[in-house]
Amino acid sequence: MTATKPDLGTWVGKGIDRVDGPHKVTGTAPYASDITLPGMVHAVVVTSTVGAGTVTKIDTSALLTLPGVRAVFTHENFPRLNPPPPVLFGEAPVAPMQDGRIVFHGQEVAVVVADTLQEATEAARLIEVTYAPEPVLLDPADGQLEPLALSPDTSRGDTEAGWAAADVRVGATYRTPENTNNPLGLMGCVAAWDGDHLEIHDSTQGTNALRTTLAVMFGVPESGVRVRVPYLGGGFGAGLNQWPYKLLAAGAARELGRPVKLMLTRPQMFKLVGHRPSSEHQVRIGADRDGTLTMIEHRATTLSSIDFPAVGLLTSGTPHLYHCPNVATVERTVRLNRRYPTSMRAPGEAEGNWAIETAMDELAHELGMDPLELRLRNLATDLDPATGKPWSSNAVIECCRVGAELFGWSRRDPRPSSMREGDLLIGWGMAATGFFAYMPMSQARVTVYADGTAAVRSAATDIGTGTYTIITQLAADLLGLHPQQVDFQLGDSDMPASAHSGGSGLATSLSNAVIDAVAHLQGALLDLVGDDSPLHGLGPDDVVCRDGALCRRDDPSVRALIAALLAGQGLVEASGDGRLRPPDAAAAGMVHAGPYGARFVEVAIDPMIGRLRVRRVVSVTDGGRILNQKLARSQILGATVGGIGQALFEDTLTDPGTGRVANGTFGDYLVAVNADVPDVEVVFIGEPDRYTPSGTKGIGEIGLVGVAAAIGNAVHHATGRRIRDLPITVDQLM
Ligand code: MOS
């Protein structure tokens, strides 16, 4: 059953407060770290102090005599696990402590379990591990280039011919450093077995992927594993993969026959739950004298760990943003003795956009053309230039125009260092952005009760982005109820299976699953209608739920109370199950478009001391149908802060001799703080997307994309200095 276009608008779009807000601010929202179970013991992970080699000896006998210590697990006594299943992007998790092999500095080598966290921490501090170290391979030159599953090479036209034919050419190498996701909530779990049944409270972004992983690796049925994640303290991608710590906690709990709590420390968050790996981009762009692009070539390389490759996606946006007959992308990775890479907010796009949108600014400068004008001339807003098919929606040019107007771009003097305020150099920069459309499968169940209330259930998670609230608003509109009459329960793998919160995919996926579920609910309610009812004979698309009644869509005064329909059959509730039903893209004749945007930035630079201040940001996004204006704005604001961090601060440093994280604390790893963030003007434009009934696009990541390039381009405008390596630091501006 395909739902007809839903009637939305009473609650959908409104900037209502988070329905889960009161729970969060009163401390009643249970995060994994809050869970305490009877008989629970505490586990602390011990990590390697060499970057490559083998564990030769771990002396645990003395530790076991310490107060409270119950067990020390190492590769010698930790249970053997089944091979991991591929649960995300075809990548399998890593089975920990199966042998003594060390492939990165900071890898899990032991787990100490004690009655209290303090006792476990103290014993973990005293543990002595002996290694047979091996040379640590950290330099890309030490490894073999290999392709990335999600980033196949692409090519259209003839880039060499396009290069030869160009009147103006730019070519340069751009770099981005390693960044660490660092959600505010430390990640961890409480695992408890009851016979062969495992229940785990975790901070995963995907309950069903964790359920599958645990079931397969511990050799129990999926029905015997329950994953609970009603709340988690952010993710930014760090919660996407099913990291070893969860397997360590579950294994220890099974061996000990007790619930085990394992929370990572902040320094361990830098080692054990992924990061955005560093990247290098060689870009060549050619254009005619009038600014029409003749070729784009984007060759990118990123770093992987030995056991776990990077996601890549560094070049994924490049073939699609601009009209250009000749485009080639090539992406490779190298496996080294580095920590596990993972998705970090706008994975790949954030780095690739830095390279392409800086190169476009360089091209505009070479052409003597306004960088905005260069974008407007080439942006592919009408169709996808890679396939030639129309987008389901794409307002990127309107994003640029609206942003330029709000920013006052027409007052920009194009000459570098021409705009000054006293001793300060003022720079204005911009960048265009896109983000891929990703829509994993979700399911949901919608239930109505005789008292007129309703519940929505799905195994989805809310990583803080607002899933609870937007789905409550949507269900309220679909059922004709007030949001307070709708209870949305999520974060439990026993509920209808759902995708992870990731890839900016959940809002679209889940909203369409709920629309489908309500259509099925209407069908289930019609089944209860008697032969003599004026609703008899109608189809699910002919009726709507309004105020506790099933009504004719075209004449809501023709209605039957849901309570009466239920009572007539001796029922107390009725449900509809739904899932995402993606349209047949070929039949639909269009390409599913992700969100688009434009970023405009003003910087002020004091050249005497190299101080850079971001003074203004105008961020315009085509996010399709916005489900909640307030929460959507918060997504873009937060992502803008992340973009400022990417541009100016974030840089996970690896000791080149050992592979150790050199700045793995919040004292040493800089992020943008309030004083670094100016007024940010957030604007949404565009129409509901045509691709799905809900019309939404994912906006969790797009807000970050383009911020770094806009800042770098503003720096060039202010100083005449072209910076191609992030982050942009004081020493580069003096
Ligand atoms: Mo996002 S990096 O897909 O959690």
Image: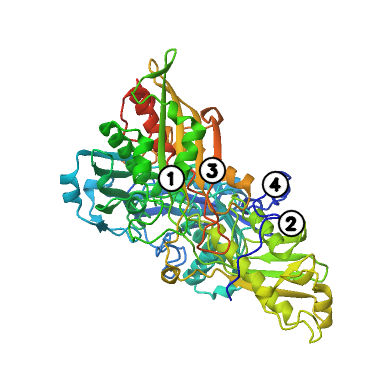
Q: Quadrant of residue 91?
A: bottom left
Q: In this figure, which residue is indicated by the disc labeled 3?
A: 636
> Label 1 CB, ligand 1: below 8 Å?
no
How would you rate the neighbour count of disc 4 (Cα within 10 Å): few for under 14, some for 14-19, many for 20 or more? few
Disc on the earlier residue, 4 or 3: 4
* Placement of the N terminus among the 4 image quadrants: bottom right
The three-letter amino acid code for the residue at tag 3 is Ile
The three-letter amino acid code for the residue at tag 2 is Pro
Q: CA distance from mark 4 to mark 1?
A: 32 Å
Q: In this figure, which residue is indicated by the disc labeled 4?
A: 17
How would you rate the neighbour count of disc 2 (Cα within 10 Å): few for under 14, some for 14-19, many for 20 or more? many
Whether pointer 4 and pointer 2 mark residues with C-beta atoms closer than 8 Å, the reply is: no
Disc on the earlier residue, 4 or 2: 4
Disc on the earlier residue, 4 or 1: 4
How would you rate the neighbour count of disc 3 (Cα within 10 Å): few for under 14, some for 14-19, many for 20 or more? many
Front residue of this view, candidates 299 and 408: 408
Query: Is residue 493 depicted above or below 357 in this figure?
Result: below
In the rendering, at what x and y percent does residue 348 appear? 38, 49
Q: Secondary structure at mark 3?
A: helix
Mark 2 or 1: the one toward you: 1
Disc on the earlier residue, 2 or 3: 2
Front residue of this view, candidates 187 and 539: 539
In the rendering, at what x and y percent does residue 242 appear? 48, 59
The three-letter amino acid code for the residue at tag 4 is Asp
Q: In this figure, which residue is indicated by the disc labeled 2?
A: 483
Query: Is residue 33 depicted above or below 456 in this figure?
Result: above
